[in-house]
Amino acid sequence: MPSLRPAYLWVIPKDISCASYMAILTGLQKTLKFPLPPELSMGINSSIEFLKETFPRCSTPESFTCKETVVDENLICAQVNRSLVQQTLAADNSSAALCSFTITEHACSVADRLAPQTLATLLKCSLESQTTYPVETWKLFFQKVSSSLNDTLETFATMTSNNSRPALSNALDALREVRLANLSDAELQSRTVIGDLVQRVIGPFLASPSTNFLFCLSSYNFSCLTYQIVVKELSNQRQLMNSDKQQAVFTYFIKPFLSRKESSDPGCTLSTNGSQGWLQANLGSFAGFATVQDLQTLNPHLSTIEILSELAPSQVAQLLISAGSSNDTTLIDLAFERLEKGDALENLDEFLTQLTANGQVLQFQTVVRDRAMTRAFYILRLHFLTFSSQELYLWFHVKLVTILASFTPQMLNSTISSMSCANYHVVVGGIAKVFPAIPLLRRQEIASVLLAYIRSSTSVINKPACRTGLETDVEWIETNLGPFSQYTTYSDLKAFNLSDVIILDSFSPTQLATFLLEPNNLSNENVVIMSFRRFALSASMANIESFFDTFVHGPAEQN
């Protein structure tokens, strides 16, 4: 097990059970309870981090443990020439000489004799070199300089800007064990102590937290006020973290801390005013990584309406899903007011993607769906002509599917009026998918809009480039009109030089009856025979009834 490296973990199937995940994780963690060569312990730590990031579904608070590092100085320093370091620095106290030796070599020799300014210079050049040392090495180094550690780190903070580097992560883990783990409860609950610690001492390292650092931090007996100081400082560093680190702050620190049942103020709900104040103080800039269910669990008294303006677009979608089907348009208006802040297109994309996540389709009440489509169109209308065919496909076939049945004829006309035939076909195909949910009158109006586009674009539509892949007239009708063709007439379709037989094949029973009732058609024996032969091939009882109902009553309605 100690020789297991992250690269070996790639072979683990992604669908393993969480029980198997825990068995592997527990085995890796147990190996760290024994002294190991630094390079092996660093490999195990990397494997643990990789495992947690690869299987987040199994990373529940119950599975977390705060790992402490075992330091064996003899093992770490076995290959170090201590006298060489001492002799060199005795003869040359320049920064170049200082930085020519590794942190390991300093930790094993004269680190405890160096002044804070010198130690800060050593930290600066070591971290700038991007050399990664095991947690054990950093812990030994910090233990050796513990008497001047605060002064050293405060000086170092003035010499470097905050940043996120892999080399800083292990150093931060070691600092927690040497500096934070020894704080008393009184110190952990002192705003002065914790404020100085996170801002001036470990601040330069704070953008590189490991999952173990974060979970260990969540187990400390902070008060709600000192916890909020830590959250604020982590929020200040968030832009320096990658998305995995940002998610980890919520998953491994914020959520476990606020979930503690033994606390006198579970969720830290008593130390803030209102839901928005609670969200900002306790989750800071990491609020977007929680689900709405997380937020409601952490604060049972949370007003989701009050915090809606602070939610991420995906969380706004989750809120609508949790609210269920309703005729109230107030919530959808508030949701879109939030989406229109900042990059409205990107926000709408994230919102709609969440609505259709995991194959779910939220069933909006019609009045709410109409409002949502109107607000979404307001955001999208200026972008349709800039979208590629692939982008249009994603919007009309995937993202808008929950509200597309409310796409009005006016919206359609505005969207397709200047479109290429390829993009027009994409739009028709998307709206065709929601055809069953579109009201009858709107279907008829959409058919009129589609016909108008085809008529005005005949010179384009009939070009070979626009008929690519359309080998028959049936395919032409399906691609250009979709199921809305049933709301057209024989005369409408005949104008496009389509085969009579093909046109008849595309007719609904009602259209066929209407066609036969047109002047000259009923008296044309060939037309009548052809029509009934085609109709008989696919006629059901419902179709026969529909046909004869129109056929019998049609003349009376015309007279």
Image: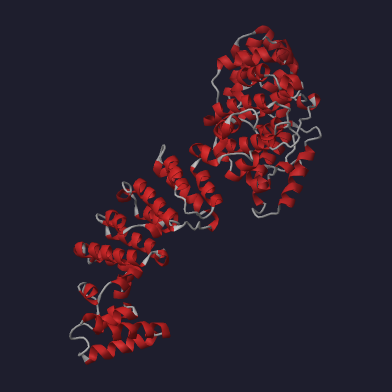
Residue at (76% x, 30% y) in the render: 69
| Position of residue 375 in the picture relative to residue 66 (left or right) | left
Q: Nearer the viewer, residue 48 or 310?
A: 310
- Residue 271 sits in quarter: top right
Residue 383 appears anywhere in the view: yes
Percent of width and height locating residue 368? 44, 53
Residue at 61%, 45% in the rendered image: 293
* Quarter in which the N terminus is drawn: top right
The image shows residue 85, relative to residue 509, as above or below, that is above
Instruction: Give coordinates of residue 80: x percent, y percent.
Output: 74, 22
Q: Nearer the viewer, residue 79 or 370?
A: 370
Relative depth, front residue between 42 and 401: 401
Q: Residue at x 20, y 90 (%)?
A: 523
Asked whether residue 183 appears in the rendered view, the answer is: no
309 w.r.t. 92: above or below: below
The residue shown at (69%, 30%) is 217
Left or right side of 395 for 204:
right
The percent coordinates of residue 290 (x first, y second) are 59, 41
